[in-house]
Amino acid sequence: MTKQDFVDAVADRAGMSKREAGAAVDAMLDTITDALKNGDTITFTGFGKFSTSARAARMGVNPRTGEKVHIAATTVPKFQSGSALKAAVKGG
């Protein structure tokens, strides 16, 4: 499913225009992104939790040359699914 397919589905379910649904989806994604940039956690009970996770610096290996490479520490987004979402997906 593409973003446009998702927007179309939201518009159909919510009974709104595709333009309004697109604006709502964009606003939701921007809000989640901004919250994660600020180090906040977003929890949708039953659906899941968006958070960030710190990855420590480590040594890696370039697969082409076998040369050791330093990989810098970074912060990455993380999603942990909730029980209702897991049950819905598992059920079919």
Image (cartoon, rainbow, N blue to C red):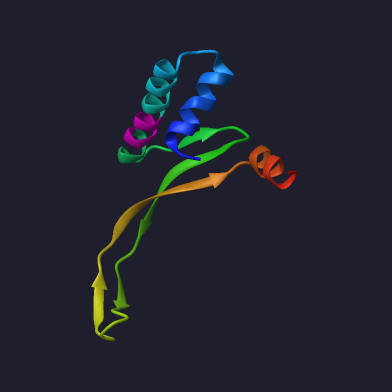
Magenta span includes 22? no
Side of 15 relative to 31 (left or right):
right
The one nearer the camera, 23 or 80, is: 23
Q: Does residue 21 lie above or below 73 as drawn?
A: above
**Left or right: residue 43 compared with residue 70:** right
Instruction: Give how far across and how far down residue 39 sits, in percent.
Output: 34, 41
The secondary structure making up most of the magenta span is: helix
Q: Start and end of the magenta stretch? A: 29-34
Tell me if 17 is positioned left or right of 36 in this view. Answer: right
- From the viewer's perspective, tell me whether residue 7 is left or right of residue 63: right
Which residue occupies the foreground of this view, 56 or 71? 71
Is residue 87 placed above or below 67 in the rendered structure? above
Q: Position of residue 45 (x, y in %)?
A: 59, 32
Q: Is 27 drawn above or below residue 59 in the view shown?
A: above
**How far from the left and from the top, in percent, is residue 33?**
35, 36
Q: Position of residue 82 (x, y in %)?
A: 61, 41
The residue depicted at 43 percent of the width and 35 percent of the height is 3
Q: Residue furthest bottom?
A: 66
Q: In which quadrant of the rendered view does residue 13 lie?
A: top right
The residue that appears at 41% across and 16% down in the rendered structure is: 20
Quarter of the image for residue 14 reads top right
At 31% from the left edge and 37% from the top edge, which residue is drawn?
38
